[in-house]
Image (spheres, grey):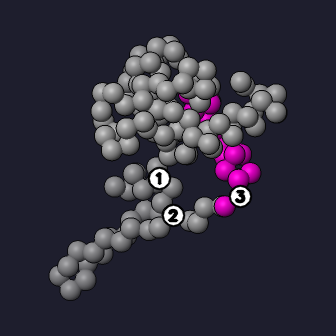
Amino acid sequence: MIARCQQAGLPAPEFRQEGGQFIQTLGRPAPQVASQEAQVTSPVTPPVGKLLEAIADRGELGNAEIRKLLGLTDRTHVRKHYVDVALAGGFIEPTIPDKPASRFQKYRLTDKGRAWLASQKTKGGPP
């Protein structure tokens, strides 16, 4: 639980015992910066950048398609280091949000993902 909170950018939960009861307190995330520029310039790891480029080139992609395009074999590695990070950053979204574990699940760029790619083109970076 502590690791999941840290991955989501949340403070670690607090645990205490009061009057024979076990109490767990979950923190709230810091307020997000509302600026569109701040959202576009969010740090993107190289794996996420590659994923965004692949989706921009090919359209909606599933995990197997992502692995094939990027020359990767480990499904869990792709999920943890590419897909989950891009989802958490708001750069991609699932095509079937109600069924995240569906074998038919694919991912597409969000406005934020497209904006990041466009910002890389203007900087002379990838894409």
Name the residue carrying label 1: 8
Q: Quadrant of residue 41?
A: top right
- Mark 3 or mark 2, which is nearer the start of the sequence? 2
- Alpha carbon distance from label 3 to label 1: 20 Å
What is the quadrant of residue 35 in the picture?
bottom right
Picture coordinates of residue 52, whole percent (x, y): 59, 30
- How far apart marks 2 and 3 lie (CA) works out to 17 Å
Give the label on residue 113, or none. Answer: none
* Label 2 – label 1 distance at C-alpha: 8 Å
Relative to the observer, which residue lies in front, 84 or 91?
91
- In this orientation, which residue lies closer to the viewer: 44 or 22? 44
> Does residue 98 appear left or right of residue 81 in this picture?
left
Residue underneath mark 2: 29
CB-based contact (under 8 Å), mark 2 and mark 1: yes
Do the residues under discs 2 and 3 have CB atoms within 8 angstroms? no
Q: Is residue 18 above or below residue 75?
A: below
The reply to whether dot 3 and dot 1 touch (C-beta < 8 Å) is: no
**Which mark lies nearer to you, 2 or 3?**
3
Q: Report if residue 77 is visible in the image.
A: no
Measured as percent of width and height from the top left, residue 45 is found at 61, 35
Q: Secondary structure at mark 1?
A: loop
Earlier sequence position, callout 2 versus callout 1 = 1
Q: Secondary structure at mark 3?
A: loop
Magenta-drawn stretch contains 49: yes
* Bounds of the magenta segment: 34-51
Task: Check the image and name the residue furthest to the right.
Answer: 123
Residue 36 placement (x, y as % from top left): 70, 53
The residue at 42%/56% (across/down) is 5
* In this rendering, position of residue 8 left or right of residue 39: left
Q: Earlier in the sequence, mark 3 or mark 1?
A: 1
Label 2 sits on what residue type?
Pro
Please name the residue that numbered disc 3 is placed on. Answer: 35
